[in-house]
Amino acid sequence: MYKKVFGTPFETYAITQTVPETDEVKYFSVKEEGNQITFTLPLENNDIVYGLGETMGGLNKRGGRYISFNTDTADHQDSNPSLYASHNFLIVDGSIHFGVFFDTPARVLFEIDYCNSGEIKVVCETDCVNVYQIEQENAYLITREFLSAIGRAYIPPLWAFGYGQSRFGYMNEADFEAVVQGHEENQLPLDYICMDIDYMDRFIDFTVDKKRFPDLKTFVAKLKEKGIQLVPIVDAGIKIEPGNAVYEEGVAKGYFCKNKEDGLFQAGVWPGMTHFTDFLNSDARAWFGNQYRFYTEQGLEGFWNDMNEPAIFYSEYTKGPKKLNMILDMLLGRFRKEEIEARRIRDYQSFFHQVNGKKVCHYDVHNIYGYFMTMAASEQLDKILDHRFLLFARSSYIGAGRYGGIWTGDNTSCWEHLKLNVLHMPSLNMCGFLYSGADTGGFMGNTNRELLLRWLAVSAFTPLMRNHCGKGVARQECYVFEKVEEFKDILSFRYRMIPYLYSEYMKAALTGDMFIKPLAFGFPEDDWARKVDDQLLVGGSIMMTPILEEGAMSRSVYLPEQMTMVKYDGKEFHTMPMSAGMHQIEARLNEVVFFVLKDKLVPIGKAVNNTSEVDLKDLQFLGDGQGYEMYIDDGMTKEYDLKNIVYIDFSAI
Ligand code: GLC
């Protein structure tokens, strides 16, 4: 890896290695104009362009226009250039094999063969950027080199691989009890329930509504007895309210972002007017991270960071009509998209950070704000707790994958977003986000039985498997649907796969590998495999082949080599060898079909009620391999190490 440095780039800590400098950006022509730099690269017809992590478009990013500018948006359509994250890493794979990372927290535009331009055009809205470049034989090796340069991926506890239930709208202890009961009565496994903003006193971080949760500590302990964790949400903004100790201390210590007049910037989010912690200031970061003690003292070990783009509903400079939320304004048609976008930019240009004694406009460093919030939480939680914790966030930048996981924000209960979930996973892994997943079942709109079952069968392979939805939409806990045993079948699949998923995740994280890969990364010479985007490699032994169409009971699958087909029907794993080529496979709503690669094995565990019952040693193996490298540890302490791999050898049998 080499880097070409333009100007004096802002330190993002995305790359953790020392990288030698070069004086060119290979293959690209570079135009420096005013405060921006444009990079262009001509594409050949067969070049695939991978990367960009959390963006719309396909696995191959050709044909799209994408803008790295972290945005709170529920509009997950190809016409939307910006989602919640900025992952400026691209790979051109074809006539050349070249990876490039534009490391800047500023806004960056990517047009990739947009309107058949036949080129990649990257416009950085800054004249200071580190351009990291990697040349290797293929896209997979480029990714491996990139992952080792951005540092080891976040390692969650074993329970984070369990199933999580969530809903914006669980109000009080009784609501949580009902979720536990719904799972227990129907023998549905469960590891955690997320606490959305209603647990707080008027949406104020680091508080609990005492009427709804009179004794949270006891409640947390009671659920833990059953092997169920509670995972509270923490939002970026701190409510402006005299008497709120965190607010008062933040003001006294000067830890909040300033406005244009050198006062404290005020932004309206869920709790009303808030201040934003200056996460770019290391003291402020440590201070904010330390506030999580409020939760750890109640026995909580999992956290969910939100609204950290940062999301702004309205600000002191851009108040919406009746102070309504920008997104609502847009949904209700009060403003056009462009006006909302302009308001957003105006807000981000109106507040400032203090970095090493220098005033830095938020707009210029916008894309690392959420990442630095995750860093704040993770670094302190690591000190506070002597064991692992669950942490995932909405906004991110490359590098954040070392500190926590991410989920892909407010999707919709529709089949396109199930497909989007599948497309996102490999792209996120390329950018170092191994612990990730989408809102299973969909956040906006009403889900339905078929969609949720098929979605669960996809999420069964993603490290974060959380059913989450918005306030006011139809309920989507598994037990509210008819024939609940079909949901039980899919959830039991997930839990039986945990020995494999955990083992493969740990090996990937500890060796700088991806956990979920495009099929082509395993079969780089196979032209068909290069075209497939809905069959993914999960760990080193599995190809997942989910059904993603409404009403479909079968799908076609391409096998680049002979493999073992596995069908799980809720009770048994049925296996069948299959030759290379195209096949039509069938899966009922309660079934999962996947393939074990040639010469590989997959360890399978027993059906359990939650991860506290998972036995990483009591295993059955699927596939025609001779042995398997099983990663085993206690799933909780920080003594993770490749030494924990046990080779299970079947060659003599
Ligand atoms: C945001 C989050 C969503 C959450 C809601 C309320 O929209 O993306 O997951 O439920 O805020 O906190």
Image (spheres, rainbow, N blue to C red):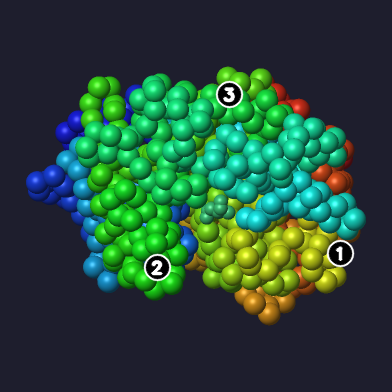
For mark 2, give the secondary structure.
helix
Residue 554 visible, this angle: yes
Q: Is mark 1 within 8 Å of ligand 1?
A: no
- CA separation in Å, label 2 and label 1: 40 Å
Asked which quadrant contains residue 182, the reply is bottom right
Q: Is residue 575 above or below residue 51?
A: below
**With 522 as the anchor, is 252 left or right in this view?**
left
Residue 136 visible, this angle: no
Q: Nearer the viewer, residue 28 or 405?
A: 405
Decide: marks 3, 2 in contact (CB < 8 A)?
no
Q: Residue 114 appears at what percent x and percent y?
A: 29, 67
Marks 2 and 1, the one that precedes in the sequence: 2
Q: Is residue 599 above or below residue 414?
A: above
At horizontal 65% and vertical 63% (from top left) the residue drawn is 441
- CA separation in Å, label 3 and label 1: 39 Å
Say which amino acid is labelled 2: Met
Residue where numbered disc 1 is placed: 485
For mark 1, give the secondary structure.
helix
Q: How busy is the neighbourhood of tag 3: few (under 14 within 10 Å), some, or many (20 plus)?
A: some
Marks 3 and 2, the one that precedes in the sequence: 2
Residue where numbered disc 2 is placed: 330
Where does the C terminus fall, quadrant-wise? top right
Q: Residue 388 appears at what percent x and percent y?
A: 65, 28
Residue found farthest to the bottom = 551
Residue where numbered disc 3 is placed: 382
Q: Nearer the viewer, residue 363 or 432?
A: 363
Q: How busy is the neighbourhood of tag 1: few (under 14 within 10 Å), some, or many (20 plus)?
A: some
Asked which quadrant contains residue 544, the reply is bottom right
Disc number placed over residue 133 in the picture, else none: none
Decide: marks 3, 1 in contact (CB < 8 A)?
no
Where does the N terminus fall, quadrant-wise? top left
